[in-house]
Structures are given as C-alpha cells and as structure tokens.
Amino acid sequence: MLNTSDESNPSNAASLFVWLVSCATAAAIIGLLAAHAPLRIRLIGLFPIAVGVFAGVVFAHISVRQRRPAKSAIVFGTILAMLMLIGASLESHRTFANEVRAVTRKEADKVLLATMQQGLMTPGDKTSSQAAAMVHAAAEERAAIPAYLQHRLSGIGDIEHPWPLVVWILETLLGAAACGIMIGQCLSSHTGLDHELAHDRTTDIPIRR
C-alpha cells in the first residue's frame, strides 16, 4: 500500500526533483556506457533496443521508489531514453571523429614527408600550405556525421545516403519505445504485486465473533 503522508506524496516537489535528477543521472551514465561499449556488441537494430530496455528497468525502479504516477513515468522515461540514445550517438561520433582525424593526418604526414624528401616540396611554401589545407578538409569530411552513420553500417555493405540516417532514426525510436514499454511493464507488475499483498493482509485479519 502506498503511504499517503506528506513525506511520500507523489506531488511533493522534493520527490519530483529527486525523481527527475535520478533519472537524468541514470540516463547519462547508461548513455556513456552505451557509447563506449565494445563494437562487437553494438549490433545494428538490437543494441539500442537492449539499451532502451535496460534504461526502462532503471527508470521504473526509480519511479517506484519516488512513487511517481505510471503515465508520467512512461512519458518522461520515453523522452529521456530518446535523448539518451541521441547523446550516446553523439559521443560515439566524437570518438570516431577523433580517431579518423588522427589516422588521416598521420597518413598525410607520411605522404608529405616522402614528397619533401624527394625535393618536390619544402616546408612553409605555398604548395605545402595547400596540401595541409587539403588534408584538413579531407579529415573533416571523413569525420562528419554522415560518414559516421555510413561507417556504422559498413559491416552490412556500402549503403548510401539517406539510408544510414533512416536506420539510425528507426533505431533511436525503437530504443525509446522499448524503454517506455518496459517502464509500463515494470510498473504494472509492481502495482499488481501491491494489490496482491494488500489482499493477503486483508484476508489474514481474523474475524472476531
């Protein structure tokens, strides 16, 4: 049975604040873990759903402890899961972009060094500056978000725009939906358990004659 005292009232501002902050903190942690998870477990179409399900369980647990209404928990959890998955993708892209820039510049440095050793270019001349600018532009192009989205699907094949973006959007929506469904399932199970416990307590009360 839920306690209806002021300290545990679902509308209490302190309870609401703790609920929001706890869910947001959990989402940030789960998002970072998902972004830096090993590549072998980041299966296209499945990994975001698994992350959403896990986040749903966590959000539901927090909602039960803070005695939040089911509808609010589901709506807020679904939106938060969508933001969490977007944030995880942005963090993954940041890591990917840094690696691509480093590799591109390292390869370019080898080519420039070989060219200079052949006497075809000297440091500081116009040709060298133009080559450096071209290397920078190539690195940024290979590190852009469209290139990252396409790279995610490289294990499947050479998939052209806009399908990598479409796949990512669908994954994000499915992950958020999975989170909302899991929150609803967990809260429904918890409510059913509460009702069973309340019924058991009622039937266990001896009847005085």
Image (cartoon, grey):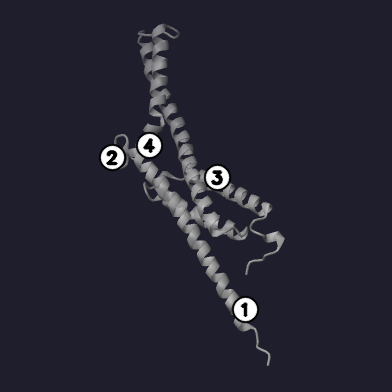
Q: Residue at x 42, y 20 (%)?
A: 136
- Quadrant of res 202: bottom right
Q: Secondary structure at mark 2?
A: loop
Q: Nearer the viewer, mark 2 or mark 4?
A: 4
161 relative to 126, above or below:
below
Using the numbered discs, state the Cα–Cα distance from disc 3 to disc 4 in whole angstroms: 22 Å
159 relative to 23, above or below:
above
Task: Please provide percent x and percent y for residue 194.
Answer: 57, 70
Q: Dot 4, crowdedness within 10 Å: few (<14), some or many (≥20)?
A: many
User: Which of disc 4 and disc 2 is earlier in sequence?
Assistant: 4
Q: Nearer the viewer, mark 1 or mark 3?
A: 1
Query: Badge 3 is on which residue?
Result: 28
- Tell me if 199 is positioned left or right of 143 in this view: right
Q: Are marks 2 and 1 in contact (CB under 8 Å)?
A: no
Query: Badge 2 is on which residue?
Result: 157
Outermost residue to the right: 6
Q: Dot 3, crowdedness within 10 Å: few (<14), some or many (≥20)?
A: some
Amino acid identity at mark 1: Arg
Query: Badge 4 is on which residue?
Result: 149
Task: Please provide percent x and percent y for residue 188.
Answer: 51, 65
Q: Dot 1, crowdedness within 10 Å: few (<14), some or many (≥20)?
A: few
